Amino acid sequence: MYASRVRTSLRGWGGVGAMAVLCVLALAAVLLLPRTQTPVQDDPAGARTATGLQARADDCKDSEAQDRTLSPSGADGPTIEAIKSRTGAKRKLVVGVDQNSYHWGYRNPNTEGAELEGFDIDLVHKIAADILGDPDAVQFKAIPTSQRIPAIKDGRVDMVVRTMTITCERLGDVAFSAPYFKTGQQVLAPKSSEVTGYNGTLAHKRICTASGSTAYIKLKADRDKGTLPASADISTTVPNQLDCLVRLQLGEVDAVVTDGALAASQAAQDPTLELKGGAFTTEYYGVAMKKDANDLVRRVNRVLVDYRAHGWQTSYDTWLAATLGKDPGPSKPPAPQYLRTD
């Protein structure tokens, strides 16, 4: 946490960047080569390094997607140089965030100027401090769940820090940092509900998920396979995950499926709701960036090495301990395994 922080205004959707039209051929070659899983060394920070390069999308498994990131580096490259070359009031890191996820990215109405705060916001300030030398050199942009990837690809933001799960499918569109948080999908429902978890009690129940979310992908796949009751209604999808909470409170749906970390925060906001059953997936949040922004990915990974040792615990204690428990162990991701491309 930063003891003193200037007010940072939310800029919305202004300043749409030009769409990228060319990919670096060398990077394309890298992305098409298979990755070897053999670890070759342990660094002082506990991270592992693997030989090999990024694999084809059809070779990827979601269980290993969190390891498909570049090794840390403090060197500036074209992406970082472009950020640093911005002048005047525009010399800021442009970051897509949420403003409605309690204790993650949340505009607190009880602070002067309704300041953005939360676990994701702390990480953004840490990255800005490293790249621009000022934790408040940030332009926040509110990005709906369904617009996280388009905002990156269109150049509206430099990165997205918004409880975004690293998956193989998403790695086809964007690059991710090493994971900074571990979570899993859970069911949120009224305490009075007969739903007991991700099981047969969801039969004939209306379930809400965010468009483009890993929750919806999981539910659809499981219903197609028959592991989720065919009568479960998953047709309600919304642009922002918080909209599911509103639908649940209005009685328009019977349950919500989302990351357990977010669900716990929403249950804290509404004491009539509770988590039903345990997590039924394992997922990792990462910082998302453009696929060709190798220098920025490496720089963020270097920031995360330091943040895991100095800052992560403080932020967890401040924002999440009350809802997820004082023991951060289940939420702290394992030491990352980096791709080595040399």
Image: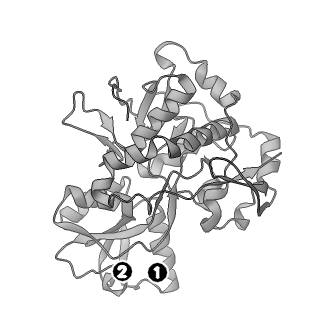
* Residue ID for mark 2: 232
Q: Considering only vertical position in the picture, is 151 above or below 33?
A: above
Q: Residue furthest top?
A: 88
Residue 107 is situated, as x and y percent measured from the top left of the image, at: 28, 39
Residue at 44%, 51% in the rendered image:
163
Instruction: Specify whether 171 is left or right of 125.
Output: right
Q: Residues within 10 Å of mark 2 (few under 14, many from 20)?
A: some
Residue 219 occupies quadrant: bottom left
Identified by mark 2, the residue type is Ala
Q: Between residues 42 and 87, which one lies in front from this camera angle?
A: 42
- Quarter the N terminus occupies: top left
* Residue ID for mark 1: 223
Q: Between residues 189 and 240, which one lies in front from this camera angle?
A: 189
User: Can residue 153 be seen here?
Assistant: no
Residue 56 is situated, as x and y percent measured from the top left of the image, at: 75, 60
Q: Considering only vertical position in the picture, is 87 above or below 52?
A: above
Residue 36 is situated, as x and y percent measured from the top left of the image, at: 79, 62
